[in-house]
Amino acid sequence: MNESDRFRSILSKNRAEELGYDVWEHYVIPPFFKRLDLHTARKPNLIIGGRGCGKTMLLRYLSHQSMFSSSRPFIPESAFSNIGLYWRADTQFASAMMKREVPEDTWRAAFNHMLALVLGIEVLSSLDSVAVSNTTLISRKDMMDCNFERLSAFSADLPSSATKLRDDLERRLWEFESWVNDVRKAKEPSFLPGDKFVLALIKEVRSQLKMFRNTTYHVYIDEYENLCVYQQEIINTWLKHSESPLIFNVAMKRHAFDTRRTMGVEALSDIHDFRVHDLEEYFQDEKLEPFFAEILFLPIESAGLKDTPISVETLHDPEGLEQRRNSTYIKKVVDAAENLLPDVSSDELAKIVFLDRVLLQKLRERIQSGLNHKESNLRVDEFIKDQFPSASIVIPALLHRKSEDPAEILSQLNSLGRSKENRFTGKTNWIHNNFVACLLQLYEPHSRACPFYAGFHTFCQLSRGNIRHFLELCHKSIYRAISAGESSFETVTIAYQAEAARQASGAFLGEIRSFGRLGNQLHTFVLRLGSLFALAHQRPTQSESEQSHFSIGSGKTDLSATDQEFLKEAVKWSVLFESRGTKIKNEFEPENIEYVLNPIYAPYFHISYRKKRKLELSTDDAKCLIGGSYDDVRLLLRRYANAWAVEPGDMSPTLFSHLESGV
């Protein structure tokens, strides 16, 4: 495999499942790691976050496979204090363990039995992980000499040696899976009593191995939402009664806690029974650029493909966080990322337009349209300033505003040219407030990718804390550069980055269909909402520029329970993000929830990824976008097009083809 192929292969792995259970070499300790307190916690933790935010990588890093990885050069004594057991719920298998003429109490006993087998195997596997690790604190012989004869009280034919016991539990798990698959014909196995069996096994380990005497086992259950309700109730019971030496923790998407009931009379209670860690919120609290730069450079450095400013060993060690917060180090690692994936300033974006014959002609046409709108005899060339391209690009929006006079706009432009006080860069700051929206408006009717979506810092914002999205943007950018024969890996051009952003955006948009039971409806909703935002971006005046989030006000009818459930599902899958309203027009108005479209979809729709202006939807419009018919949505978009004075010719032929007549 040559250097280019190695580079492509390494960066293409952006999911924890592609890396296996031992992620020691691949994991970068996030800046908020010590806030989690997962190593020393004596209370269950509820870890929340959408796909790609790092939940699975975090749990696998905390598991015994990574903590005692053969790649870890030194195993401290503290590693024996807390040992993680990772288990991910299997959606298909979990849903098979219900009904089919089998009583519910049998399924409950069966699920407990499965957990006994799965976690029992993991406890014994943790001994194997220690045995092959670089620890000098305990020998392999000590662990292999463990005698589990006392566990025969649960089942007389359980072997006593560690190796044979694990093999037997695996055999019983296969036997159990066969029974679930053919429950009417296969013989029901003898069930082990879930947590009691696991606790007994842990007790034997602790009593026979000195280094494990004070060990607490932490069970990390991933994708908790995939479990059936009765299965969640069993896990909830184990959560509520967690204490050393066995503590349960769960990871799930937002709004996925379907039930807090337990097998007893008490339900789970926040604070008293568990601590909540929202990874996406933690990411928003931190400065992400250094962390994302480290994630970008880790596989490159590990493969020896390019000199980078990181220290691989420091990235894996929680104690290295303080060193990584050093301002000199942060500047060095971010500068390196900027060199590889350069950002584009507003001035550079404007110059690109002026160098592009098609885009420059489009700008001229929009300026002429604005002059015609104002019935002005001024010439287009007077508003095209090569030395001030950013100012020229915002002029079409200004010409379409009722309050602005073409002659005054030209006067302000000339003042800018003479370095005098003006409204383009002064307090009114026309350029700052309107440039991005006007730039996107120029690119929208064309098939080419917009460079507004290029750059390391832009990729960080498009990803919004989603590690998978960030890595995919980087992978596709570098892949394009390599495919074009640029193999130095020093800098990826703006054009390749912009194309990569558009390609990744479209791919992630298509992926929405696989998002749970409402995947198809979520996909349709995003297409509708994105089309509405794209329509807003075509507003000639740009009076409410860069709309990419919305709130829901009043209407003729209230949102139904089904509508509310749909919005929760959209947030659960990170299609939308919830935030609290910051601009309340009436002091007596209750605080609104605002919904932000995931910025990764912005390049597909040619809309802004920045949270700038809010679109206020009525409940009727929201209901239409969520579940309205094709004709209903067509009428809604037509109504907004009329209200915003968007002409059919200004609309994207792909997004708005159904609006081309009758607007």
Image (cartoon, rainbow, N blue to C red):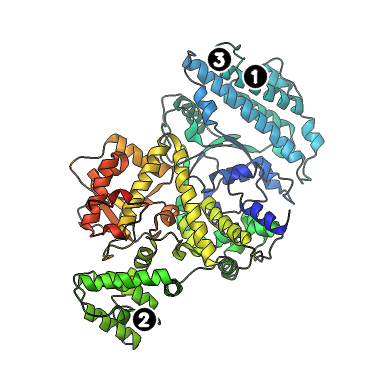
Horizontal side, residue 255 vs residue 640: left or right: right
Q: Residues within 10 Å of mark 1 (few under 14, many from 20)?
A: some
| Residue situated in front as seen by the camera: 321 or 12 | 12
Q: Are marks 2 and 1 in contact (CB under 8 Å)?
A: no
Q: Are marks 1 and 3 in contact (CB under 8 Å)?
A: no
For badge 3, the amino acid type reads Val
Task: Work out whether 362 lies above or below 618.
Answer: below
Place of residue 155 in the rendered image (x, y in percent of width and height, measured from the top left):
67, 16
Give the foreground label among 2 and 1. Answer: 2
The disc placed on residue 183 is 3
Disc nearer the start of the sequence (2/3): 3
What's the distance in space between the residues labelled 1 and 3, CA to CA? 11 Å
Label 2 sits on residue? 385
- Residue name at image x 61 percent, y 34 percent: 245
Q: Earlier in the sequence, mark 1 or mark 3?
A: 1
Q: CA distance from mark 2 to mark 1?
A: 77 Å
Of tags 2 and 3, which is closer to the observer?
A: 2
As shown in the figure, which amino acid type bears the numbered disc 1? Glu
Type of the residue with mark 2: Lys
Q: In this rendering, is residue 264 above or below 240?
A: above
As helix, strand or loop, the secondary structure at mark 1 comes to helix
Q: Nearer the viewer, residue 566 or 439?
A: 439
